[in-house]
Amino acid sequence: MMRKWIILAVLLLVVLAGGIPLYIHRNFKEEVVAGEGVTGFFKLSKYFSGIEGTIADTDVFELKGSEEGGKMLIIAGTHESEPSAALAAFYLIENLKVDRGTVYIIPHFNRSGSLGTQPGGGFPLYFSMETPWGEKTFRMGDRGFQALDQWPDPDVYIHYPEGQAMSYIDARNTNRAWPGRPDGLYAEQVTYAAMEMIKKEKIDIVIDLHEAEAMYPVTNCIVVPEKSMSYATGASFYVKGREKFENHVERSPTAFRGLSHREIGDWSDAYPFLLESPGVHLDQITAAKTPELIMDGIDPFVLKAAEKGLLFVPYDENGFSMDRRVGQHSSVIQEIVVQWSKKNPERGLTISAPRYKEIVDNGLGYFFKDPSKADKSDVYLQ
Amino acid sequence: MSADAIYMQTIIAGIVMVGAYVVGKLFKFSTEMCMFLAVVGGGIAGGAGFDLFRHLAEGSVTYLDIGLIFVFATIFMNIIKESGGTNYIVRKIVGAFYNKKILMLILLMCVILVPGALTGAGSISVLVVGGTVAAALGAMGLSKVTISAIIFIVAGLSAAAPPINIWAMMTCANTAIPYVGFTMPLLIPIIILGLFTVLFLGRKAKVIDREKALKDIPEPKGLSGWSVGIPFLVLIFLLAAPRIWPFGFPVLGLPLAFAICALVAWAMNYKRVNILKVSKDTVSQLTPLLATTAVVGMLVQIMSFNGVKGLISMWIVTAPLIVVWIILPFIIPISEGLLTYGGAMVIGIPLIWMLNSNGINPVIVLAGLSLLWPLGDGLPPTALIGRLTVSTVGYKGSYGSFLKECIVPWIAITVVGMIMVIFANNLSFLMMVG
């Protein structure tokens, strides 16, 4: 009898030792200090009350310029295992200046996914970066909704409304759930809420920030449907010519449903752009999944694949750092806005934030404000 | 850390994992315990420290759904068996087809193919119809080892059969390839290979002596066709309804669907079946398999954490194409045997990207690889479906003898699968009709 109790006690200790870090991670708050551009803050449920008070609801930051103009929505954290997206959103919330038009930023679109890492993925729970005032720590997340929040999975996921069959794991993928539906799974409800926002606010440009594997053909690029093509091409040429980094354009396939760059364009008047930066920590062929790999993107196994010509991005021993990935997002977003505003002056936007070179030269941490020295009302917990 | 140091650290972590597994075997620990030792060794060698416990917790739920499906599907089938339903079905089959040997083999093949094709899980075929088919094949005079081989191979093909092929779907999900155009590239080889398997392994089957067979299979007393049929009708409804009304039917998940069917089966037979005893016995029966699903998740997690998974897949995708062709017939089933679905993630994804970038049709390649992955479900250390099959059939011989019986269809499947992989572009026409 005593032996059974001892085994039970040991098991309990092991469960607690394994579970407590996951609980702490789920409740860990990232701090973002609203920059001078932030003029408002609300929940996405403003546009669809069905997600109010649920894990699908998420924060929206509003940055409204002094002059009326067009409107842009920046979505980050569609896939929370692609952290340069959320970091780019935090960076823009703290640094973006909007003179004309309105910019909305959602840093954790798939909030559930930001609260846990992928089972079987072996990822660290956190990663940190140096700033002038100390270390800033962020949560690592999962690609889809956590099973803790959206479960059970169907045995096959069928896309609404096209009826395309997909893997059951895509039922939790917010980038297979557009345009969404009000009575669907959480992943479909959050995209439905965003579609409602896009329509009601008459959003002109939707940016969906991502990272992709270096071995994946659709990486380091802007994915767009036909109607966004000319703006994306202009932005791609500009950043290659002036800012000296590659960011090619990929056409959104019409046969592959549920993706933001396909459905937002098809179901609204907005012009969607999906931005991919290369996150080598996502590749299957990496060495240990460490916080340093997420931040620096340096990996000898990926380098070996690069030497064999298997990658779709230029890659060397310097890796692909977070500074570069966020810098690319910043420059490409701003250049898309420039291209858009040139062709649509009546719905133009005027925005500015440090671009690629400045971010790479100074390091991303340089641009984050110290929450302990900021006005408490400007500090938002994410 | 320098590149050389990272290589060295990863290789050491791999050696420690293998060493811990071997030490466990020397102490005659169970396979699950040996794998767990490998996990702990890999975590420590990878520098997890106290975070090892978090990795164990996170990894253990990677395949939680599969474990739950095993439990509820087996409870369902054990209730049917306990009520006498299995004997009832076999008696009906024998009575109708006793003098049509070939037709009966083909019919039984179709019976095994359907549940796996609809759910994407060979285990469901084994659990739902394996016992009944085994009894029917037994009545045809086939040995238990042959019956086990037939059920295992055809159940594996059923998992790869359209419409639901989880290996292809998971790889598509992670490579942004639409899961379209797979129907004929999967269906045609699977029907051919299924026919070959049942006709080859069933070549020694005899025309059934109807009277003798019916005498050997006890007739369940007071059991009506409805009390056997209704639970299966409910199952068919619960599997079909989400496809017929994809946006109107609630998402139940397979574990709950089987739990509902188990309750219906019990309600139809509550006088004959003690549901608590059946449930308890089922969990005892499945404990080793459940332990395997949990520990495989941990293994995938730790191999990803310490980079051993990345090292293996890097070696494969950077190898010359000719070497890849040679090792694929071995490495695909072995990766499935080691990591179950994790194998598709570790090797399938980089492999598809590599072949796709070489201009090779990824849909046909994936369809070909999908034939090879289920074979790995019979391979140690996990051998999930293989063990489930021999347990369902009640084969008491060595596991090695069961694998030996599978060898001819195994080779046939490997040859067809590799032809599809190597000549994918020449076989692209198959997509035109699927």
Image (cartoon, helix red, strand yellow):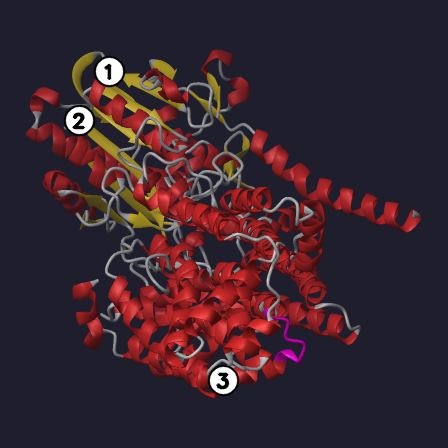
Q: Residue at (40%, 29%) from the top-left corner?
A: A90
Residue A380 visible? The answer is yes
The subunit letter for the residue under badge 3 reads B
Asked if labels 1 and 3 touch by Cβ distance under 8 angstroms, the answer is: no
Q: Residue at (68%, 53%) from the top-left corner?
A: B283
**In front of the other: B412 or A233:** B412
- Label of residue B407 in the image: 3
Could you classify mark 2 by the number of other residues whose Cα lies within 10 Å: few (under 14), some (14-19), or many (20 or more)? many
> What residue span does the magenta drawing correspond to?
B393-399
Give the residue at the far right of this rendering. Answer: A2
Mark pair 3, 1: CA separation: 71 Å
Residue A317 visible? The answer is no
The subunit letter for the residue under badge 2 reads A
Could you classify mark 3 by the number of other residues whose Cα lies within 10 Å: few (under 14), some (14-19), or many (20 or more)? few
Q: Are marks 3 and 2 on the same chain?
A: no
Give the residue pinned by disc 1: A65
Badge 3 marks a residue whose secondary structure is helix
